[in-house]
Image (spheres, rainbow, N blue to C red):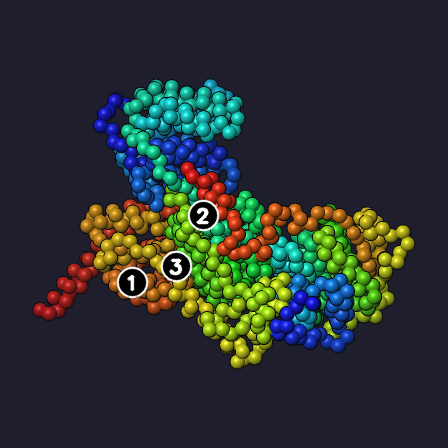
Amino acid sequence: MSPNNNRPILEDVNIIVAGQGGDGSLTVITMLAELLRMNGLNVYTERDVLSRIRGGHAAATMRAFAGDKYCIGSNITLLVALDEEAVEKNARQLDPKSIVVYDDSGGPVPSVLPKGTKVYSAPFNRIAMRTMRRELYKNSIAFGVVGRLLGLEDETLRETFINHFQRMGQVILEYNLEALSLGFHLADEMDIHEGEGLYKIKKTKPEERLLITGNESVAFGFMVAGGRFFCGYPITPSSEVLETLQKWLPRVGGVARQTEDELAGINMALGAALTGTRTMVATSGPGFSLMQEGVGHSGSGEIPLVIVDCQRSGPSTGMPTKPEQSDLNLMVFGGHGDFPRIVLTPGHPDDCFYLTVDATNLADKYQCPVLIAMDQALSQNIATVEPFNLEEVSAVPGKRLEEKDLENMDSYKRYKFTEDNVSPFAAPGTPGGLSLVTGNEHNEWGLVSTDPVNRVKMMNKRMGKIEFAKKELPRARHFGDSKAEIGFIGIGSVFGVILEAMEDLERDGIKTRYLQPRTIWPVLEDMLEFIETCRRVYVVELNAQAQLAHIIIHQGADPDKLISVLRYDGIPFRPAELVKRVLEEESRIVKSRIIKKGKKEAKLQ
Amino acid sequence: MSTQPHTKTFTPARPIWCAGCGDFAVQGVLEKALRKMGIPPYKLMLLAGIGCSGTIQNNLPCYGYHSLHGRVLPAAIGAKLANPDLTVIAAGGDGDGYAIGAGHLVHTFKSNPSITYIVMNNCNYGLTKGQVSPTSPTGYHDNAESGLDSILLGLSFPSATFLARGFSGNPEQLEKLMEAALDHTQSNKGFAFLEVLSPCVTYYDTHREWRARVYNIDEEEGYDPANRGMAFQRALQLREEGRIPIGRIFKGEHASLESLILNKNELPPAQQKIGHDGHREHYEKFIDSYMG
């Protein structure tokens, strides 16, 4: 590489590091992220792994950028491929401008790359084995080359190693520093010298930001909202909610219990919720299917409960590590019988925090199940977000009765008919408030009843709570040109992809707007109004049956206005792909309009 | 009772059981034991499963909960961990506890929470008209399998602390066992498991047969319930002889679940004041730990 003083400033870069599970791809990405954060950039990382601990293709992707981005970008700047498979699996994401750093210890680079892609070959594995007798160090050697290539200074890279490896002990640090030096030496041989990389790094002070996943944000939101009891059973991709709460809840006197299965999980949560404790469970599709009876019981017994579904590819065991949004029907319509529920849909880790606070308050206020629809990418990708504002949120208690309230009442009925259909509740342990709670149909006292008049009144009371809740359920957020004819609707991790696709479309002269629903059940007026005022709306979903579109149509949206853009191959959308799908559809519409117009004119003649 | 204000609450229901059902005796001794031990109704959380026995919570003043079929134990554990000041009693039948809910029984023996579990065992599914249950003996309704012995199951858990079996036809002994079970949980010693042989007069009337077969192990000279090996041996021997041991079969020692997992420096979950919990400092620490 020759010295180039016109190197661009690093403002937006997408890097994939890929190899076999256990190769340390994630470590390279994590360290790069730490380093670039220190230089004032923000980061977003995604992982692509198989459901196994070692072996199998594993990749981590990072985007580093100035300003705000909410997803991985469309153009991959750099692929660091630690073996042939890493090239084969990721070639589809590359373009002629992409650069590949390839470990050729196992053979030459496979001929699957787009024409023009620049390839740097280097035998990281062989050097690691020859010099250090351990394959383990190949990623540290690669890190030296990649750092140089990006334009980072050797000293900065060394400092990052010290920060990262010091906590693992002096020996490990020293070995890795040796590997890093081997990387620098290799880079020199490859003609990649210090200060001659792709970018100039503008060193700015990093903004105060959190690096956090959606799952961790959900866990925190629950805790801040006064959530003190959590049950979970390990399942990808929801386990981090359990792990985070196991670490933090006991510190505030709470309980985070790993149960023997999801049936125990939701029923233990129900038992805790009966005592007036704010309670949550988190799971993924298979576990959520098992929990269905409990979800209905929460609705029927009017027991407040927050349920998080970190959706993955289904049905059945599906593809456990891949994102999908295919449990929406189950969340909205699942369970036997009729019961009220609320389904919230955060779009980014910060949204996960604020909406989980809302969910916890809403469950308590309306005494019904409140579901949070996550997806694998939203759950597990790490985003850079503004620190959560504790002043903006509060834990608002529901309708509770204490001993002194009961003393002034003639009678206490757990399921009393009230104006807003919510019955004030005395927790077990409160003198004077004895009650019965049951999933059987019951009268106001909680005694089992099959009286037809009571049945209808009770059903209407339960279902009627949602009408009152509607007024305060989280509203959608609007983005883009409010007069645009073309609209987008999409939830979860699709949020950032739509935002970026909109920018790209605008560059092509197509103005769009986006409604990000944050409540999908009940369907709120704002979503229907948005569709009414658009000419057509692209509903972008990670499932095969257009579940979200059908839920909206079910509630009165004009089906002719909705165009579904679906993906269910386990791969998240990239903005460019969405742009392409929209442009194809738009040109098809324009063409058919010309044909229609032509036919009309022909008829007239 | 003295602290109860005079607010009217639900009027306890009359039992729905058939005349002569063993469950009447269970309810009788339970009420007696609660009174004797001075457990006020407002501190009692009585949870029941699904089945004939799963209606007991309707019949006495308490905070009652009717769980989903087979899920009474997880619900009871949730209530106990959230508010350990409550007296938590779970009740149900052999179908609820040993068939659909068997997985939870195993894990409750394992985790040892201070709750009492009363299983009214009638060796059939009475509420659905007498089908074969996990404890039905070979030959009942052409049942080819052998019946399950819950005490032998419980004995295999190193964390088991209280295993007893009573008989509705021996209310004097049953009363003592009920009191001992409640005393075990009131003193936070862990899980009190009490199976009661409770004949179903309508579908499988075992009253006479059981009266002949029960063997009161409390009266056996030299029997040491703290000796797990002896408990196993006697339970097996008696089974082979066609006898059913009743009494306090095993007592062990093991830390209770709530004593192991609740943070003693904080109020338990249900007693914290929502919105004023004073944990701001921890929330800020959480945020700091994710600053990157």
Q: Is residue A78 above or below residue B132?
A: above
A369, B2: nearer the viewer: B2
* Label 2 neighbour load within 10 Å: few <14, some 14-19, many 20+: many
Check the image and name the residue furthest to the left: A605
**Share a chain, discs 1 and 3?**
yes
Q: Which residue is mark 3?
A: A474
* Label 3 neighbour load within 10 Å: few <14, some 14-19, many 20+: many
A319, A350: nearer the viewer: A350
Q: Is residue A584 above or below residue A151?
A: below
Q: Which residue is mark 2?
A: A217
Q: Which residue is mark 1?
A: A531
3D distance between C-alphas at marks 1 and 2 = 31 Å
Q: Looking at the image, is mark 1 or mark 3 earlier in the sequence? A: 3
Can residue A498 be seen from the camera position used here? yes
Q: Is residue A553 above or below residue B217?
A: below
Q: Which amino acid type corresponds to the residue marked 2 in the rendered image?
A: Ser
Query: Given this view, does label 1 or label 3 mark the residue nearer the observer?
Result: 3
Which quadrant holds the N terminus of chain A?
A: top left
3D distance between C-alphas at marks 1 and 3 = 18 Å
Residue shown at 34% from the left, 58% from the top: A476
Question: Dividing the picture into quarters, in which one does residue A76 lie?
Answer: top left
